[in-house]
Amino acid sequence: MTPIIQLLRPQQWLKNLFVFLPLFFDRHLFDVDLLVPCILTSIAFCFAASGIYCFNDIQDAEVDRRHPDKCNRPIASGAVGKTTGYIVMAVCILVSLALVGVIGHSWPLFLVIGAYIIMNIAYSLKLKHLAIVDVFIIATGFVLRVLAGGFATGIRVTHWIVLMTFLLTLFLAFAKRRDDVIEFKASGVVTRKAASHYNLQFLNEAISIVASITMVCYILYSVSPEVVERFDSPYVYLTSLFVLAGIIRYLQLTIVDVKNGNPTRVLLHDRFIQCCIAGWIAAFALIIYL
């Protein structure tokens, strides 16, 4: 992987699949007229996110050099200069905005993408150092992806999708902070200021609370009359089995195995969670498309 490609972190682009949620739940996943703008919106978020990663790596270069893994990042290692990093960042953001410009319903999308970029620049500069605020910012970024998918396709985003997206990603963000605290205690190197304002007891309780709320929220969603009527099926609740199994497995990885440092890496390598996601998609697809 060349340093520039590594700087863009393409492995993180999986996160932008959240853009497709409104399309999936509205039974239009195979509608080409809606799928094309949704794909373009996802690509726009890929470039926007990569631009933010460039900016973040530039800001964190000195701290990253003291981290056992992050020291290998292109900016921290010196493989890519800061000036080049700023150029790559600018190109990514311009490409992102240009893609939004060719999609219908452009103004709402511009506002969402613009809010995402501004929020994450503020996150890189200051907000990531504020405990609790940092994880709420991360979760909000995923909600913006879902809203962008709705604006790109003209599909109304329900409160259920917003709630579930926020809660699930908040759970993952707290789990990631737990890993940061463990690294901080093991190495003594402060790679994230917010880590000093967390401890394992607080994070274990926060993770358990958010995981519980997420599971209850999903079960309420799956049995709500409006959802049963919308999908014309009383069996949506069966998909909650995969959600419960996936969350409990992630809790196991977080608390027992301490392997939650990178949620994307977990998704790409843990077969149990992959099976849960595949089973959930298959079950939901059968319910709402057949």
Image (cartoon, rainbow, N blue to C red):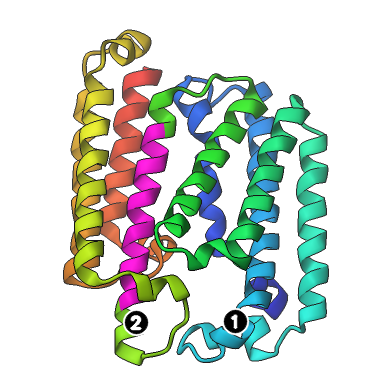
115 in relation to 197, above or below: above
Query: Residues under labels 1 and 2: Cα distance?
Result: 17 Å
Magenta-tinted stretch: 163-181
- Magenta: predominant secondary structure element? helix
Residue underneath mark 2: 183
Looking at the image, residue 95 sits to the left or right of residue 34; the answer is: right
Q: Earlier in the sequence, mark 1 or mark 2?
A: 1
Q: Where is residue 262 in the image (x, y as percent from the top left)?
A: 41, 67
Which mark is nearer the camera, 1 or 2?
Answer: 2
**Residue 68 occupies which quadrant of the picture?**
bottom left
Q: Residue at image x 47%, y 76%? A: 192
Q: Residue at image x 33%, y 72%? A: 179
Looking at the image, residue 119 sits to the left or right of residue 267; the answer is: right
Magenta run includes residue 171: yes
Q: Is residue 260 visible?
A: no
Magenta run includes residue 272: no
Q: Residue 7 carries which label?
A: none
Q: Which amino acid does label 1 sit on?
A: Arg
Q: Position of residue 257 (x, y in %)?
A: 20, 72
Residue underneath mark 1: 73
